Image (cartoon, grey):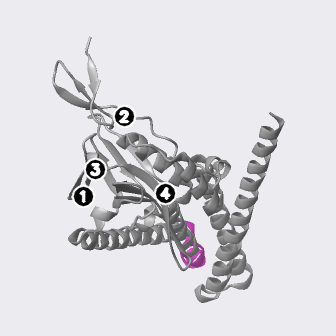
Amino acid sequence: MFEHTSISDNNLCYDIKKNEPFLIVMSSPEFHLAKVKEMHNGVVRVKGNANSVNLLRMEGGFGGEVLVGFCVILGLFSSVMTYGENGLFESVKIGLGVFLFFIAFILLLTGLVSGLISSLRSLGNYYQKYWDDFTFDGVTVKSRKFQIDASEITFVRPRVGKSGDEIEFSASVRSGPKGGRELGRVVVDGYDIANMVEYLSSQFGVPLDEEGLEKFLKKEGITAQEEYHIGKEEDKVWNRRYGVAQLGTATLIVAILHSFFGTTISGLLIPLILNFAIVHNIMDYLHTQAVENAIATERMERSID
């Protein structure tokens, strides 16, 4: 039997017989956008995913779904417009070619843009302040080329930055007494802030200010019920519904206008743009209503219990 002894306040222990450290990995909570990967060597990798420069990964992949949907619409549009001149088989080939062309173009463009921005960030101290993608082995936090000794960490607290309409939530990792010096921050979606603060506090072995966290959530209008109901699986379902609604209505509009009125490409642009805006607002309203109904139902169940 091995005998273990804990060192400091972190989740690091020593195997006395082997004289080797090992990390006690805490179970990761459910996140909305953020991801936590517990690797085989005990190292934990954390991604906030709310500060991504990749268009395809923005909003948990919603940006990618919209762009792919746009490519599908262009492909269908090209097939419909060329059907009369080339026949079914040729028009399908043309539509597929247009779809693949725009997919390749978007992948190339997003890759170049995200690579350029990441390179510019690496030249400065961006990743020292923003831990967008970092690892922790129980001793050291590594954010790209920067390394931070975990023994310096004394607490983790939520923070919010507001600039105009932009709101940035982050888990601020700090050193020293209350207030202290910020070592780094993990930018997250608003619904991930509570779980991220709790998770990092447990990983770094520092006390959690539950009262302060609760006050912060109430002040920012983030409740436990909302955090529970707006999860990964529900978002996936609503994103699929949104994609199907956009593609279905766009295809219907193209088919009707072209078949009955012989509308040209330029004439279809305005109806498609209007369709995009209308479907987006309708789906957003239905999503909000579903969440509010779920919250109301849970509150009623809790009051009965």
Q: Which amino acid does label 4 sit on?
A: Pro
What residue did someone put label 1 on? 144
What residue did someone put label 4 on? 158
207 or 144, which is in the foreground? 207
Look at the image and tell me in which quarter the C terminus lies: top right
Task: Label 4: state its secondary structure.
Answer: strand
Assess disc 3: are there few (<14), some (14-19) or many (≥20) residues with their C-alpha within 10 Å of its C-alpha: some
Kindly report the distance in space between the C-alpha atoms of the residues bearing marks 2 and 1: 22 Å
**Position of residue 112 measured from the top left corner of the image (x, y, whole percent):** 30, 72
Which secondary structure is most common in the magenta stretch? Answer: helix
Assess disc 2: are there few (<14), some (14-19) or many (≥20) residues with their C-alpha within 10 Å of its C-alpha: some
Q: Is residue 135 magenta?
A: no
Q: What residue type is labelled 2?
A: Val
Kindly report the distance in space between the C-alpha atoms of the residues bearing marks 3 and 4: 18 Å
In this picture, which residue range is highlighted in magenta?
Answer: 78-89
Residue at image point 69% right, 65% down: 284
First-in-chain label (3 vs 4):
3
Task: Label 2: state its secondary structure.
Answer: loop
- Horizontal side of residue 210 vs 104, given as left or right: right
Please indicate, yes or no, whether residue 93 appears anywhere in the rendered image.
Answer: yes
What residue did someone put label 3 on? 152
What residue did someone put label 2 on? 25
Task: Label 1: state its secondary structure.
Answer: loop
**Position of residue 267 measured from the top left corner of the image (x, y, whole percent):** 64, 88
Please indicate, yes or no, whether residue 252 appears anywhere in the rendered image.
Answer: no
Mark 2 or 3: in front is 3
First-in-chain label (1 vs 3):
1
Q: Quadrant of residue 147?
A: bottom left
Mark 1 or 3: in front is 3
Kindly report the distance in space between the C-alpha atoms of the residues bearing marks 4 and 2: 22 Å
First-in-chain label (4 vs 1):
1
